[in-house]
Structures are given as C-alpha cells and as structure tokens.
Image: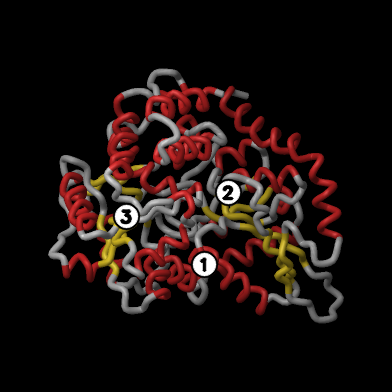
Amino acid sequence: MDYTTKHRRSYIYDFRLVWWKKIIIALLLVVIPGCGLVTREDSVSSPASETEPVHLTITYAMGDGAHHKGIQTIINDFKKSHLNVQISVVEHTQQAKGYADELSLLDAMGQFPDLLEMRDTQMFADAGLLAELPKSIAGLFDDIPKVNGTIYTAPLKAEVPQGIVYNKRLFREWGLSEPATYQQFLEVCKIIRNKGIYPLVVGGKDLWHMGFWTNHFMLDHVYSKDQEWNRKRTAGQVSWTDAGPKAAFHDMKLLWDEEYIVPGFMNIADHQTIDYLVSGKAVMMMSGPWMFSQLKQADPEFEIGFFPVPDRQGRIHIFGLPQPSGWAMSSLAAADPDKAKVIEQFLHFFYSNEEYPKYLQAVGGTPVTKEHEFIQSSELMQEVEQWLDNPDMVKLRGMEHYWGADEIPPGFRNAFYELVQATLSGNMSIDDALIGADRIWDE
C-alpha cells in the first residue's frame, strides 16, 4: 500500500476515532421519539404483504437548493411507485466542514448510507466503503472515469462551466458588454462600483462556495499551465509559494481590495446571493447554470446573462471534463442482495425519460446519458452547451477534481478554503496563507 492510499484511509479512520464517544449519544437521540438528529424518515408504509419492505438510506450534498429539490423530487416519485421500499434520507449533522467530512462522520457513527452522492471517490474507494457500479447502470453512459480501474459512480449531469451570472437588464441600461479580457472585466466592475452598487456578491458563509473564485484563478494561473501540478506538489517539485498560486491569490484579493465584493461576504450564504441579484444590491456573481432556475423562481422577470471570465490574454479556461463523481453504492449495501436490487431499480428510475428531466430542469443541467433526445434545453443552456463545443475554450479540472496520483490530500480542500477566507477577510497575508497551504498539504 503506498503512502497516498494510507493517508486517505487514515483520514477516514481518524474520524472514527474522534467520534466514537459521540456514537452512544447519537444512538440515544435516534431512539428518543422526535429527536431524529441525523435522519429524516421519508418513507411510505407498505401495504400488508408477505414480503418484508426493503429499508434504504440515501444522502447527497444538500448545500445547493436546486440540487436538493431535484433529487428529492425523484426520491418522492420513486416511493409512490415502489411501496415495498422505505427510504430514509440521511440529513447532514452540520458538525462537519464539508460534504466529504460529513460522509466520514456518518461512517464513524456507523451510519454510512446505502446509496449516496459521491464526490471524493478516490478517498472513499480506498477506504473500502464503495462498491462497483452495476453494469446495467454503467451502460447508460458513454464515459465514466475509473478509479483504481473500477467504475464506482453514475454521473448526475454533464460537467458544466462556471462563469459570471449577471443582471442583463442593468448591463443593457448602462451600456456594458461582456468582457473579452480580464482587464475589461475589471473595468466593468469599476463602472458598476462608481454607480454606487457592488458589482459582485460572494456567499462565503458556505465554505464550498469559496471554490468558485478560487478554482477560476487556479485554472488561469496554475492548471492551464500544468495539469500535473498536484502530483508534482506531492512529490515536492512545486510549491504553493511559487509564482502561479501567488498570482491566483493576488488576482482574487484585488476584487476585495477594490471593494467590488458586497461587504460581509462571510455572513452571506450561497442561497442568499440570489436575493442580492434580483433586488439589485449586486449585479454579478461567480457561479454556474444551476442558478438559472433559482433566479427565475425568485423573479420570473429577471433577465439572466452568463459569461466566462477570460484571462488577461483573452483565453478562457472552463470546467467541462468528466469526473468520477455521482451516485455510488456502499460496499455494505452491495453485499445485501435486496438492497442492491432496489438501488439498481432506483438508478434506472432516476435516469428514466420521465424522471431525469425533472432533475436537469431543477439544476439547469445538461444530460450525460447516452439517450437524451427527450431533454429540451433552454436558450440559455444551449448557449452554455456551445461553450463546451467551442475548441477555443480550454476545458480543465479544478483543484479538487483530480484523482489517483493527481488527487489533493484528504481534507486539504476545506483547510485551503479557510486560508482563502482568512486572506480575503484581511486576517492573514497572502504569503502566510501560501506557506500554510504547503504545510497542510504535507501533514
């Protein structure tokens, strides 16, 4: 077993050791009526029959409202047509810093779900917690990246670019155009700020939200130049204090120093950014197409614009490469024939012609299945899909979207985002943050 694999397994096992004392408390709370600390019972009683109902636990990342709504809608539909299945949606404890930590905590408490959305596949596969995806499900897709030579995940949607979601009406009224270079983007920000309105809103209260701007600048300054940067950092051949990461931090910090960001970003949650846009308290935010439906729900008259942020030479780097992420089955569930069968049924149901469009519509997503002629994209989403087909837009992976030898250390992402928050809040210098990043990487 190599050092990296040992490190990943150690990260999972550390959670088990830290939380073992809390398991007794958690179990006591679960059995007390009404206490339900970890799970919400979302079940439909089975009719009297000779067959015992199958109990299934499911969880997924719940930070994004549209994603949560899209998945829960299909779960509810499945329960209505499968009365012999009782589903418990495992709620997040809110005691962890991010989704991966939440899953590690559930594992430590003996509550690792049967079916779950998986984003850190390498770490959890190395810990022996995941099972190979059923072949009938894997066959629904053209390209699923393998981890350790195995397909573990069914992608929820095609990878889509991040970019600036903006108020198109205000751009038109003020004579603003979508920028062709990063300098033009800064000029747009300056014009908006001079009108007494903050150009950008950031939902920094949600740690994961910090990944939007962080990954953007890391693509421009690091990964567009070297897609093997992560493995080189693990080998000690590059450093966070090098010119590329330092330039990424300086570009990001400039947005805050110029007061282009709504003040108090650490107190603004991701879902609250929508209100800032529809109310006109901010004009733009870095996010993705999943925000389109949420903005229209908040204000049907809101005119949505969307553009990628170019670098100083006008080059555009976007997300768009497939990831080993999506629905995954736990190894324990796979060992139970009844659960494994129901999970396979659920996944076929999820990606069916009747149900899959409901999820895609909720998140503003692009289908990833082989057969998706039944999906009708909006005009705005068709524009986004054209980005993915545009050879002039370079498709890359973000910092935490690599696996194998290129994977970042377990727990690094959240610790790094905290350094980003501290720097942008003025509580830490860029140099200290980058030195800290090197130290955390090597821990």
Between the C-alphas of marks 1 and 2, the distance is 23 Å
| Residue 161 appearing in the image | no
Between the C-alphas of marks 3 and 2, the distance is 26 Å
Dot 3 falls on a residue whose secondary structure is strand
How crowded pointer 2 is (Cα within 10 Å; few <14, some 14-19, many 20+) is rated as many
Q: Is residue 361 left or right of residue 123?
A: left
Q: Earlier in the sequence, mark 3 or mark 2?
A: 2
Residue that badge 2 annotates: 99
Q: Earlier in the sequence, mark 1 or mark 2?
A: 2
Residue 258, above or below 59: above
Task: Check contact, mark 1 vs mark 3: CB within 8 A.
Answer: no
Q: Earlier in the sequence, mark 1 or mark 3?
A: 3
Foreground tag (1 vs 2): 2
The quadrant the C terminus occupies is top right
Find residue 252 and report its horizontal and vertical position in percent: 32, 40
Residue that badge 1 annotates: 351
Residue that protrudes farthest toward the front in the picture: 196
Residue 367 versus residue 108: which sits nearer the camera? 108
Which of the 4 quarters of the picture holds residue 278? bottom left
Dot 2 falls on a residue whose secondary structure is helix
Between the C-alphas of marks 1 and 3, the distance is 36 Å
Residue 16 versus residue 184: which sits nearer the camera? 184
Q: Residue at the location (28% across, 56% down)?
A: 199
Foreground tag (3 vs 2): 3
Foreground tag (1 vs 3): 3
Residue that badge 3 annotates: 200
Find residue 292 and report its horizontal and vertical position in percent: 37, 67
How crowded pointer 3 is (Cα within 10 Å; few <14, some 14-19, many 20+) is rated as many
Q: Amino acid at mark 3?
A: Leu
